[in-house]
Amino acid sequence: MRIALLSYRSKTHCGGQGVYVRHLSRGLVELGHDVEVFSGQPYPEGLDPRVRLTKVPSLDLYREPDPFRIPRPSEIRDRIDALELLTTWTAGFPEPRTFCLRVARILAERRDDFDVVHDNQSLGTGLLKIAELGLPVVATVHHPITRDRVVDVAAARWWRKPLVRRWYGFAEMQKQVAQQIPDLLTVSSSSATDIAEDFGVSPSQLQVVPLGVNTELFKPAGERVRGRIIAIASADVPLKGVSHLLHAVAKLRIERDVDVQLVSKLEPNGPTEKLIAELGISDIVHSSSGLSDAELAGLLASAEIACIPSLYEGFSLPAVEAMSSGTPIVASRAGALPEVVGPDGECARLVRPADVEELTAVLGELLDSPQQLRRLGAAGRRRALEVFSWESVAAQTVAVYQRARERVAQC
């Protein structure tokens, strides 16, 4: 099967989107399919050599080290570029819409090159143009962005709330597009329920295919650092609940030696950096970003506990990677996390979201119990091997492609 895999951002360090594109594309070519990734900036890294990459340039208005830059007039090539710039200047987020419009223009010239088009979380109006070409379209919705919007608006100061709502304006577009795509993929039953509720799609449109993990890379390795807690947050936003972990750590350090590894790109002088300083824990909290897979795997395997204090997760790749690493998990009882890690106490301990006292107590209990840590870690490794693999993800995804192709053929 000839597959066009679309992703408006695909670099691994942008979060789960990049991980998904890289591993799914590899799994698909392993099954004998022909895969071409169409990606906006930042582009993917580490794609399988058998996977072709078509770069879809944007104005790249959020690039490092000059985010929200002002492009030169010569950079504005067409109406889509003008739309991208205008949306950004009016505090909106244009990438999902403008990326899909650009890809629709490319695919209009390459209609006969593909059997199916698979969108990864963009849900831009351009997908409807692609469907009008007669191409079967499948879209992955990892979770409804409306959940992020609720948390971020609630956390914003009163004068910033209108700006945050404007930033998330693309959520309404995603909702309308999702309603018109008959074949939607999502990564958990919890996320499927939330998508059906928030986006107003029929449950019959949704097919649950969980994400996978490289169990050969993410595995137990060597001695663990006593007192080390690792937390991985793809973005420095309230939804990830990092502030609750930091408050818990400030309490734990009074009686214990604690080493916190925070894998996240923190905003310079942003709320998380300020909170670390205010709590007086700068000496025990170490942040890093842009790690390679091998570096991340080594860090996970070195920790005694992986903490996922999120207020909501549609899946959680860090949870699966931690389980595969044999690292015990303490996670919020929120979103899909209970579904991913299994029953409380089996290979993870679950706590109420945003409950600093309970989080502190559970972390302290585990740090004081090497026997519990060993049991939880071993159970997590077993669960990762039995339940999550990219080969299975790819095979299940192809079944959805076949369903989409049959549906279009019958029209």
Image (cartoon, grey):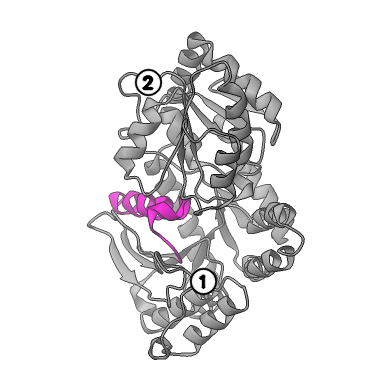
86, above or below 29, in the image: below
Main SS of residues in magenta? helix
Choose between 82 and 219: the one closer to the eye. 82
Which residue appears farthest toward the right when viewing the image?
158
Residue 338 shows up from this direction:
no
Residue 354 counted in the magenta span: no
Could you tell me which residue is drawn at 60 percent across and 64 percent down? Answer: 182
- How busy is the neighbourhood of tag 1: few (under 14 within 10 Å), some, or many (20 plus)? many
Q: Position of residue 235 (x, y in %)?
A: 52, 51
Q: Position of residue 116 (x, y in %)?
A: 43, 66
Quarter of the N terminus within the rendering: bottom left
Magenta stretch in the rendered image: 8-31
Residue 25 counted in the magenta span: yes
Could you tell me which residue is drawn at 69 percent across and 35 percent down? Answer: 353
Regarding mark 2 in the picture, which secondary structure is present there? Answer: loop
Q: Which amino acid, mark 1?
A: Glu
The residue where tag 2 is placed is 224
Regarding mark 1 in the picture, which secondary structure is present there? Answer: helix
Mark 1 and mark 2 lie on one chain; the one further toward the N terminus is: 1
Q: Which amino acid, mark 2?
A: Arg
Q: Is residue 204 left or right of residue 140?
A: right
In terms of image quadrants, where is residue 190? top right
Instruction: Give the numbered dot on residue 369.
Output: none
32, above or below 4, in the image: above
Residue 379 shows up from this direction:
yes
The residue where tag 1 is placed is 95
Q: Is residue 44 left or right of residue 386?
A: left
